[in-house]
Image: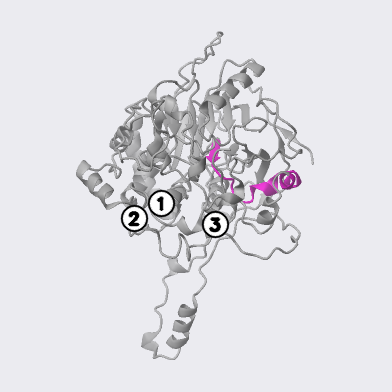
Amino acid sequence: MSAIEIQTATVQGVRVAVEGCGHGTLNAIYAAVERSCKERSWDGVDILIIGGDFQAVRNAADLTVMSVPVKYRELGDFHEYYSGTRKAPYLTIFVAGNHEAASHLWELYYGGWVAPNIYYMGAANVLWLGPLRIAGMSGIWKGFDYRKPHHERLPFGADDVKSFYHIREVDVRKLLQLRTQVDIGISHDWPRAVERHGNQKHLWNMKPDFERESLDGSLGNPAAAYAMDRLRPAYWFSAHMHCKFSAIKIYEKPKEPEQKKPEAAESTPIRIQETAPSAPSEAAPTAANPDEIGLDMDDDDDDDEQTTPAAPPAPAPAPEPTPVLSKIPTPEETATEALRAHLPASFARPAQQHHQQQPKTTPGQPVPAGITNTTVRFLALDKCLPGRKFLQLLEVTPLNATTTSHPDPTNTTTSPTTTFTPRYTLKYDPEWLAITRTFAPSLTIGDRAAPVAPDLGEAHYLPLIQAEEAWVAEHIVQRNRLAVPANFVPIAPAHVPGMPESTSEQPDEYTNPQTEAFCALIGVPNLWAAGEDERRERKARGPPPDEEGGRGRGGGGGGGRGGRGRARG
């Protein structure tokens, strides 16, 4: 198959650096970006995107609620940026992975600055950087937690530490309401089945265990696939698997807006010029590192892992859309229906209404007319270690070059000196703000027993979102309030060198003023605010007990390598 080069000399493109897993190594990541920029004769990049496992650890207490085995817990160097000892040299955004300082990111569900010039995208988000529209989603796939509420709240139990980073349907549902084009999509783990659109043999050589999971359809994140197949950005960036892999997925262009979802066409892999420091060939096996946590050593993996016998792999099936799971009747339900058949007619089950008989469709489909791109270039990168392929620089132009939703860049020229002058600032997305307002009334946090509002479908949500778009236009857009404010303030104590780097005491819960300001901006309740008395009472009660019989048993399926991950190597 022929290879397709990503063009990196686009006129007036936005200069983007993409890094895989962060793992608390900001100093090394920024140094690598600087070296790569010098190799290209660039004076800097407009934005650095980190694909998760960022580890925004402010102090030793944050480590107690990060899903990493105790012996692998390390503070990293983020606390230097949080305290102000260092400042990020480039605007940096990231999504959350499965090894994060949950206590810190919990405060910023809607997104916010974790340090000056470093922005967390929240559970899900859409932002503008100059002419680029960027969508992101945090977490990894675990089917048994997908339809649960965000019930985690400090102090965390052992289950909470892990379930915090499991992606939730209520957040994905919001992304699937978008009706206009985005340019970049970000997820920590790979969209399910995306490997079928790249060089699979090369991937199996690097990661032999991935082949069986690809063949049985369990490799990757179904929710990320729903989002990618809906949004169809020019680029989709991921991390998590600790290897570099590229693919290109081509969709048929829908003939009509309401037609059935088209199947993805066969595609060729992307060949991307490597921009990180020189590394050994990927074909050569990497020497084992005894201090690295392997993909199969995460104790979260066996909760929903499939247990098929180790038979020889069958031939790979042709790519097809991710199947929609339908409910299988339980033995009790089957017996109930058999008994009902012998009862008088008055005991018969009432006829279902017409809207309940509609066939299930793939979430996010069909694609609306406002989303027109048919080619998605996928790139996954490794973590920042010597010899790894963890960094990529490229110039990106928007799919819709005539976009006028946002003003011109703050600085249209780059500095001729070695000091990089930022050209763009982050801005909120009006459509996303309207979607956020639409779903805010049904959102719950911190309550295990709270029901999750059912998905009522796009037809139900569309007029509600359109009404909220009018509100956003009047109260935010027309008042020039789309710029993301630079309102970071530290609220938890930062680690001071010389202090203990480990503790058994969990961190305190805080009300983050950024979340307070954002909720006030769009006029929704701040569910993350609480009084000191309430917090003292919760802390005195201690963490909730773990679920009986082991976390997630009997839940909603799932499995595959979406739940696998590593801490720092």
Residue 196 in magenta stretch: yes
Q: How far apart are marks 1 and 2 (CA)?
A: 9 Å
- Residue at image position (48%, 59%) is 144
Quadrant into which the N terminus falls: top right
Disc 1 vs disc 2: Cβ atoms closer than 8 Å? yes
Where does the magenta region start and end?
184-205
Horizontal side of 367 relative to 511 (left or right) equals right
Frontmost residue, 344 versus 298: 298
Q: Which of marks 1 and 2 is nearer the N terminus?
A: 1
Q: Name the residue under label 1.
A: 160
- The circle on residue 362 is 3
At label 2, which amino acid type do we have? Pro
Residue 488 is drawn in which quadrant? Answer: top left
User: Is residue 203 shown in magenta?
Assistant: yes
| Residue 544, disc | 2
Residue beneath the point at 74% across and 60% down: 313
User: In the rendering, at what x and y percent does residue 180 appear?
Assistant: 50, 40
Secondary structure under tag 2 reads: loop
Residue appearing at x 45%, y 53% in the figure: 169
Tell me, yes or no, whether the two marked residues, 1 and 3, touch with CB atoms within 8 Å.
no
Which amino acid does the dot numbered 3 rest on?
Thr
Q: In this view, does 479 lie above or below 257?
A: above
Upstream in sequence: badge 1 or badge 3: 1
The three-letter code of the residue at mark 1 reads Asp
Give the distance between the C-alpha atoms of the residues marked 1 and 3, in whole angstroms: 29 Å
